[in-house]
Image: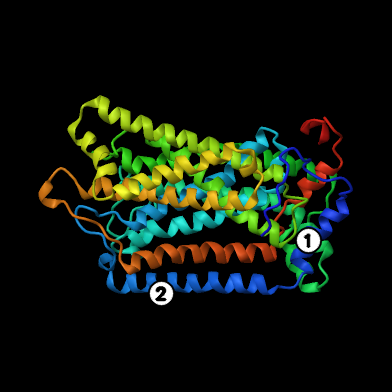
Amino acid sequence: MRTTPTSELEPLLPPGVTDDSISERISGIVVKRKMGLGWIGGFAIAFSLLMMFNYAIAVLFAYGVGIWGIQIPVAWGFAIVNFVWWVGIGHAGTFISAVLYLCHQEWRTSINRFTESMTLFAVACAGIFPLIHLGRPWLFYYLFPYPNTMGLWPQFRSPLIWDMFAVTTYAIVSVVFYFVGLLPDLATLRDRSPHRWQRVIYGLLALGWRGAGRQWSRYKMAYLIMAGLATPLVVSVHSIVSLDFAVGIVPGWHTTIMPFYFVAAALQSGFAMGLILIIPVRHFYHLKDIITGRHLANMAKLLLATSLIVGHGYFTDTFMSWYSADPYDKFIVADKFSGAYAIGGWMLMILDVGVPQLIWIRAVRQSPVVLFVIAILANVGLWLDHFILVVQSLHSDYLPSEWRMFYGTKWDWMTLFGSFGLFLTLFFVFIRIFPMVAMSEMRGLVHKKPGETKEQGA
């Protein structure tokens, strides 16, 4: 991967780009380009990790959660850490697709399909962990709001029920929003596919799209409504997830800053994962004229902004623990930076807040390789953040006689890295069967005059 600097001020589309060139390049990757050795190798690695994930879950079902490192008082371990982390990664997709669409930010058009797909795959990974964390996961349907065979309703005061409603709503809205945005591009694939079976499949998925004026009018209205529905979910979903902790009386959890801090951390991890996915694909599929340095720089600036908000959350949480004069809260804060998990506490501060400050430097924002490394480090730091929040707050509770260290077993780590296999497998399949760039929105930029607003361009 070359480190050639790119300008943050370059146009969204270079001169000479036409409707047909955009459609030919993006659709050609799906319907004409053969699977290269790079794609096959990457898919093989991802699929191997997925099989390891399936094996770890099969052993879990056979022997129970005792194969993990959880114990009393640390009854929540990797499963909840991974759940919170994966849900957070999905937030940037909704933010870029819905929030920036409502704000008329046109630079989103080249990357919104990536981030929308990332949202769906991350939510798929996240939804697995609360279920396998149940003592009897085959009874997961008890979470649904209907009286079970014993005549009992779900316990609506349980955060697990809140998570079920929040994540399910988020997944449904994200899928519908994603599919609505895909309709014009599916019709393009239908019309440009060289094989009959491809034309039949994409034709069925396109739902009879012909590009008529009435269809475009209804499409824009539906897309606008779905963007309006998806926007509140950026805040609500992770706020509800944060209540899993905030409603508890555990020191380090019982604080009103949780929803604010969780949303900021979710967006930071999502923007970081977006860069991790976009930069390699942009390089290997030669899309540097479509996903320009301006797009990467804007993503990096959003990553920087959210890291500052997360840093503010760290500072506020530490200050309020001191200001409250609660000895238990003060102990948790001191233990975070000087106790058994002090390495993780300092590392998350460095990776979450310190490393992203390099983005202030223009040369860093213009180097895809450096941004790629920063994004990876930021996501590692955010996983450590959730680990410290869950484990470090529990391992030293109110009874010193119950203090114990938590150590992840091989099954914990296999489940974590195996979830990457599920995520990457879905991503590799996505770039082979769907256009990775929203062609219909890119074509709208081609005909736009300089200085023309979005409404005028429509």
Residue extending farthest top: 323
Q: Residue 231: horizontal and vertical position, in percent?
A: 57, 37
Mark 2: amino acid: Tyr
**Residue 226 in sight in this render:** no
Q: Please, what secondary structure does the residue beneath circle 1 have?
A: helix
Residue extending farthest left: 401
Q: In this view, does 374 lie to the left or right of 252?
A: right
Q: Quadrant of the C terminus?
A: top right
Which residue is located at x 77 percent, y 67 percent? Answer: 31
Which residue is located at x 76 percent, y 46 percent? Answer: 441
Q: Residue 10: horizontal and vertical position, in percent?
A: 77, 40
Of 400 and 218, nearer the camera is 400
Q: How far apart are marks 2 and 1 (CA)?
A: 36 Å
Return the residue at label 2.
Answer: 55
Of 3 and 291, nearer the camera is 3
The disc at residue 228 is: none
Query: Badges 2 and 1: C-beta atoms under 8 Å apart?
Result: no
Return the residue at label 1.
Answer: 27
Which residue is located at x 40 percent, y 55 percent? Answer: 82
